[in-house]
Image: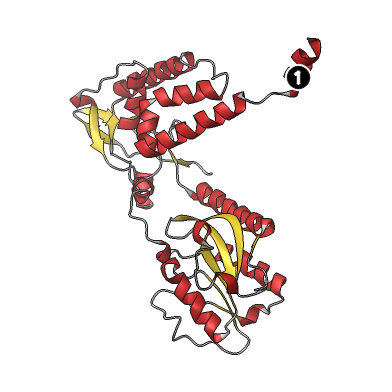
């Protein structure tokens, strides 16, 4: 992941001259657009457009397993398309990600017309087709696919090939898809912009850290100027998330000192890690910030599951305990 260096132009703020700042700090921040993107409404599974890399991996696997010529593979499901009116030439095979809401109807359409297919399906309900389940093979995988609209869906597959098999697992396909998904995730992470802000810039996020560790920092009106973006950011149409303050030399020096104090206090506040899962879950349960961030339902279910895991673990008798106690009685 690359690091960009951003600077500011010379300005006057309340009679105090602020020079061009070239030194930068290792304070990294995601752009405003990236933050906002996380909160945009997600589309349904019917709007999940499959990343081309994921699709190609699946198509290659299908072609090799069922001895299919890749030239005969067609994709009838696209925005604005109508699979019932599409053309299906002789010898064609449908390999595609259909709308999950009408998956049963799609399967019946192809089965009735003898059109071979290999379709994406939601993992948990892959076996739910009441009238089609015994005419297809359900290939159950543990694939977590992140689609192009941002939705993350546990995905398996259903096919008209090998109908003598009703259901099977495919560790090979699971690994291929998950490895490709992870590769795409890493590439996406590397592309995210992050910035080193000059010492003369302070944001609310920086001040939050100071407050968290008991450090008081104050900026007077005549010591700053309000800024929403830096020169290097404007060229990329980026901004400082939440805006910031451009500080005078004196205020910037105090800011550096405050950040140093906060870092020292943060280091001092590091305590011993929990000795076991039980202690870790207790710490999590007591951390209101993390629980609120995860959400009440998600955090309570996670904590409940981990307590159950601990309870199961502590009931186990290890070989060490057997050797240590049983044979010494």
Q: For residue 52, which quarter of the picture?
A: bottom right
The residue at 44%/56% (across/down) is 151
Q: Is residue 123 left or right of residue 239?
A: right
Question: Where residue 269 appears, x then y in whole percent?
Answer: 46, 15
Q: Is residue 6 left or right of residue 142?
A: left
The residue at 27%/32% (across/down) is 245
Question: Where residue 9 appears, x then y in whole percent?
Answer: 32, 39
Judging from the image, what secondary structure is the residue with disc 1 in?
A: helix
Q: Which residue is mark 1?
A: 322
Using the image as rendered, state which of residue 230 and residue 327 is in the foreground.
327
Tell which residue pokes out farthest to the front in this image: 329
Question: Where residue 140 appears, x then y in whole percent?
Answer: 60, 59
Using the image as rendered, state which of residue 172 and residue 303 is in the foreground.
303
Q: For residue 48, which quarter of the picture?
A: bottom left
The residue at 33%/19% (across/down) is 254
Query: How does the figure colour the protein chain or chains?
Result: secondary structure
The residue at 49%/81% (across/down) is 109
Answer above or below: position of 273 versus 122: above
Answer above or below: position of 99 versus 31: below
Tell which residue pokes out farthest to the right in this image: 327
């Amino acid at each position: 992941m690359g690091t960009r260096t951003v600077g500011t132009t010379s300005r006057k703020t309340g009679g105090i001259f602020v020079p061009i700042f070239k030194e930068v700090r290792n304070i990294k921040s995601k752009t405003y657009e990236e933050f906002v993107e996380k909160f945009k409404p997600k589309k349904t599974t019917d709007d999940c457009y499959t990343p081309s890399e994921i699709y190609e991996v699946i198509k290659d696997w299908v072609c090799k397993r069922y001895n299919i010529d890749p030239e005969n593979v067609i994709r009838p499901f696209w925005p604005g398309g109508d699979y019932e009116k599409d053309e299906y030439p002789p010898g064609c095979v449908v390999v595609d990600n259909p709308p999950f809401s009408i998956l049963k109807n799609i399967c019946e359409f192809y089965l009735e017309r003898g059109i071979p297919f290999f379709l994406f399906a939601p993992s948990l309900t892959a076996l739910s087709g009441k009238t089609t389940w015994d005419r297809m093979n359900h290939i159950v995988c543990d694939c977590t696919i992140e689609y192009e609209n941002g939705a993350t869906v546990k995905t398996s597959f259903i096919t008209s090939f090998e109908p003598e098999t009703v259901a099977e697992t495919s560790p090979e396909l699971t690994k291929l898809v998950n490895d490709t998904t992870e590769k795409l995730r890493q590439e996406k992470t590397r592309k995210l912009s992050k910035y080193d802000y000059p010492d003369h810039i302070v944001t609310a996020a920086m001040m939050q850290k100071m407050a968290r560790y008991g450090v008081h920092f104050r900026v007077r009106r005549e010591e700053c100027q309000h800024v929403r973006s830096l020169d290097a950011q404007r060229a990329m149409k980026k901004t400082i998330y939440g805006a910031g303050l451009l500080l005078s030399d004196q205020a910037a020096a105090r800011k550096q000192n405050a950040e140093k104090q906060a870092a020292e206090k943060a280091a001092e506040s590091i305590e011993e890690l929990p000795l076991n899962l039980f202690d870790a879950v207790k710490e999590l349960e007591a951390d209101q910030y993390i629980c609120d961030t995860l959400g009440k339902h998600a955090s309570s279910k996670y904590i409940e599951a981990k307590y159950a895991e601990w309870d199961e673990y502590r009931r186990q008798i290890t070989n060490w305990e057997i050797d240590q106690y049983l044979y010494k009685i």
